[in-house]
Image (cartoon, rainbow, N blue to C red):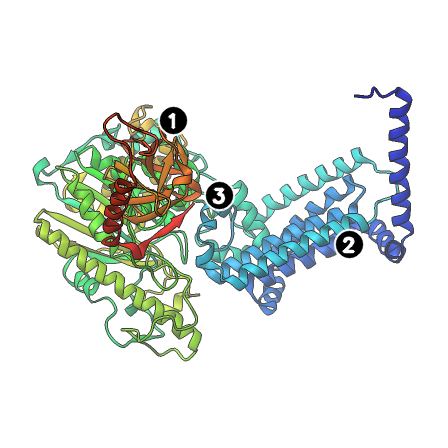
Amino acid sequence: MKKLRKEEVIAYWKERRERRARILEERRNGAFAQKMKPVYQFMNRFSLIFHALLACLINFAIEAISRHSLVQAWSYMTQTPLVFLYNAFMIFMTFTVVYLFRRRVFTRIIIGVLWMILGICNGYMLMKRVTPFNAQDLKVATDAVSLINNYFNGFEIVIVLVGIAAVIIWLISMWRRGGQYEGKIHRLLAIAGVAVCAVLFSFTTDQAIDKRVLSTYFGNIAFAYEDYGLPYCFMSSVFNTGIDEPNDYNEETIDQITNNGEMAENKTGRASDDLPNIIVVQLESYFDVDEAEFFTTSEDACPNLHEMYKNYSSGYFKVPSVGAGTANTEFEVLTGMNMRFFGPGEYPYKTVVKNQPCESAATALSALGYGTHGLHNNGGNFYSRAKVYDHMGFDSFTSKEFMNILQLTPNGWAKDEVLVDNIMEAMDTTEQQDFVFTVSVQGHGDYPEEQLIENPKIKVEGIDDEAKKNKWEYYVNMIHNTDNFIANLIDAVNRRGEDTIIVMFGDHLPTMGLEDSDMKSGDIFKTKYATWNNFGLPKQDADLTAYQLLAHITGQMGIHEGTMFTYTQTQADSSTYQNGLDNLQYDLLYGERYAYNGEDLYPATDLVMDVEDVNVTSVRKNALNNTLAVYGSNFTKNAKIFVNGEKVPTTYLTSGILTTSLDNVSDGDVISVSITGSQGIILRASNDEVIYEDPDVITTETEEPTEVNETESSETENSEIANSETTNTQENN
């Protein structure tokens, strides 16, 4: 390598500086630069005024996009001017950083684009669901990628990609053509200005909250976005997370709430052999369509659930979200905790419960000897359920990766009927009583505006708009199928002959733009719950919140277990109930765990995915079609062949046969099978491995491999495959 002299290095950097100076000079003197020079001078001279006007314009634009209406954006601006100006001030504050850079035009463009992207994301999400875009959605972004085909059609995906490409090209262009500030940059003065602006903004925020212009609690996040604007609400979801420490939180307060720790003790009025199985079914987007004020159906969409409303304990069911937020209803039901005390738009499944153990119905019932199982006919990693269920004390979790799902809804979700056999299978694996928590998915949106179901069994009447009618007709028929699933589940439980209670509820209303006036209940945060039992539990109707449901149900059965559930059972009617709930939640999740005497009473369990082992029994070479067949049991379409620990392209044939190309294996390789989830994460590996012995390599003194033997082997395998479920063959890499 040639050694550079000092003079050469100096000359090189001098040439680079001169070249850069020439390029900048050419840009300054270019036609575009000369045309824009007066604009840049104006922007620099009156930059603060310009930033204020630009902030107001951007704020109006993102609200118009979010509200899908210029008229509604105008009404928001004129009817709540202080809120509008506050949000404009927030946007203005972000523009103050431009004084730290020479490329001020480009910096303004970057900031403006980021705000507009936020508005576009919110607007699009509100087209697909009722819940607006918030910071917690970023934590489930990887999960959302797996659902892209459920929410975007091909045309929309193309538009998004073209739009992203156009913005990137424009930004690159403006980096080159946007010019640079030619005056002296006073960075210390600029930093001081940014700091003063931040302090002033903080003071303004405190005053706006004190004067009730803004609120720190969002009982309805969708309505909060409408009342307080996108910038404030989104930033609240960024910085206002978790549960704030209650003012009266201390050991004495917790001792008083828990009666000196008695609530953490195991108590039940039933003998261990008298405890029933408990099956809880969360029905995706379910509500009783008879509750709708604006349409009727040609026949009863949910006859089985209606019979349960009449004959077993039931009532209205208050949930924390509308149109989305399945995991938050699930969290309230399983933990007995109120989402009201968390930050706006937060998903505990993606924050606190993902990272640490949490008391739940599973931990409470495990203490009484129950086997505890989770089931969901969607991805196991969605909402981090595999990790969360481990932290909540479940023994096992069966997700769609372990289900050979044969039927999908027209918009691509698994049908709920597959859950019946899997629930029974989970209960069959234990000798004791079982707690089974099941999350369905069939009722999930997006609901099509065109008619996808030919000759629907149930027709919707009373809706004139064709697209809206099609959406509701699709939804009603999906809910009807879910009702049939519940009937089949009850039949299966009856055949078992064991004391069992089934609890069913809707996690939230569907994404249909429903308003309070559309519902007989007058509240879009109310669905319904129903129960069924075969051991004579009396009917005791009650309207409940999601976090009260299991406390109420277990209390009816004489089960008083779990700190949160016992607290609700004993204190729900007291005037201090909500304050105590706030203190307990904070103590168990973020505090000193005084309720447990500072101990970790409920560590994470060694959760296993599914209840059946994945087995590999043998492998067989088929030279005629260049494949290796792997034989075993409990294979699914998510089963992948691993060679020496490395995944190889796999074709699913049946629950007992997988194949891969012979090009992927060599003599002596170790063959195993694993069930994989999203992003290739291994959910469960086979218990055994098989060493591949290539018959063309291994020889003995008594017998040489022959073409006849190979052919016979191939014919045998082909015969087996011919009798298998070849129609379900699917190749995944």
Q: Nearer the viewer, mark 1 or mark 3?
A: 3
Distance from Cα at disc 3 to Cα at disc 2: 35 Å
Question: What count of labels does the image hold?
Answer: 3
Which of pointers 1 and 2 lies earlier in the amino acid sequence? 2
Q: Nearer the viewer, mark 3 or mark 2?
A: 3
Q: Quadrant of the C terminus?
A: top left
Residue topped by disc 1: 592
Please state the horizontal and vertical placement of residue 544, each as a whole percent of the image: 27, 53
Q: Residues within 10 Å of mark 2 (few under 14, many from 20)?
A: some
Three-letter amino acid code at the position of disc 1: Glu
Viewer can see residue 243: yes
Name the one closer to the observer, 718 or 503: 718
Name the one closer to the observer, 683 or 687: 687
**In the rendered view, would you say 279 is above or below 194?**
below
Please state the horizontal and vertical placement of residue 356, each as a whole percent of the image: 38, 32
Three-letter amino acid code at the position of disc 3: Lys
Q: Quadrant of residue 418?
A: bottom left
Label 1: state its secondary structure.
Answer: loop
Residue topped by disc 3: 139
Label 3: state its secondary structure.
Answer: loop
Label 2: state its secondary structure.
Answer: helix
Q: Residues within 10 Å of mark 1 (few under 14, many from 20)?
A: some
Q: Quadrant of residue 318?
A: bottom left
